[in-house]
Image (cartoon, helix red, strand yellow):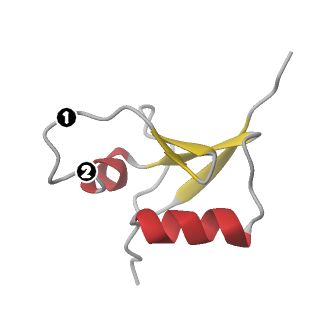
Amino acid sequence: MKKNIDLATIKNFILANALNGNVMLMLHPKNFESLFAKGTKRVRSLCIAGVNVIPDNNNEIAEDEIDILEIKFG
C-alpha cells in the first residue's frame, strides 16, 4: 500500500519523531514535486515546523519514503 506524502504527512512525521532543526528530510523527487503540482515556481526546498525538506537528486530514496538526514555543525 502506497502512502500519500503531503504537507500534513510530513508535519505528522516530524512531530511523531520529535525532529528539530538539526535534521533535514529528503523525499523522492516525484513526491517533492507533487507537493507543488499546482504552483508555477520551481521550489528547491521547503521548511515545515523548522525542518528543511529537500528533494533527492541522487536517486537514493524510494518513492513514498521519507529519509532523515542529520546536519553536522562545525
Disc 1 target residue: 41
Q: Contact (CB < 8 A) between labels 2 and 1?
A: yes
Q: Is residue 72 above or below residue 18?
A: above
Q: Amino acid at mark 2?
A: Phe
At horizontal 77% and vertical 39% (from top left) the residue drawn is 22
At horizontal 17% and vertical 46% (from top left) the residue drawn is 39
Q: Say whether residue 61 is left or right of residue 20.
A: left
Q: Is residue 74 above or below residue 71?
A: above
- Image spot of residue 41 (x, y percent): 19, 34
Q: Is residue 71 above or below residue 8?
A: above
- Residue 43 lies in what quarter of the image? top left
Q: CA distance from mark 2 to mark 1?
A: 8 Å
Q: Say whether residue 58 is left or right of residue 74.
A: left
Q: Amino acid at mark 1?
A: Lys
- Image spot of residue 4 (x, y percent): 37, 73
Relative depth, front residue between 1 and 47:
47
User: Which class describes the residues within 10 Å of circle 2: few (<14), some (14-19), or many (20+)?
Assistant: few
Disc 2 target residue: 36
Image quarter in which the N terminus is found: bottom left
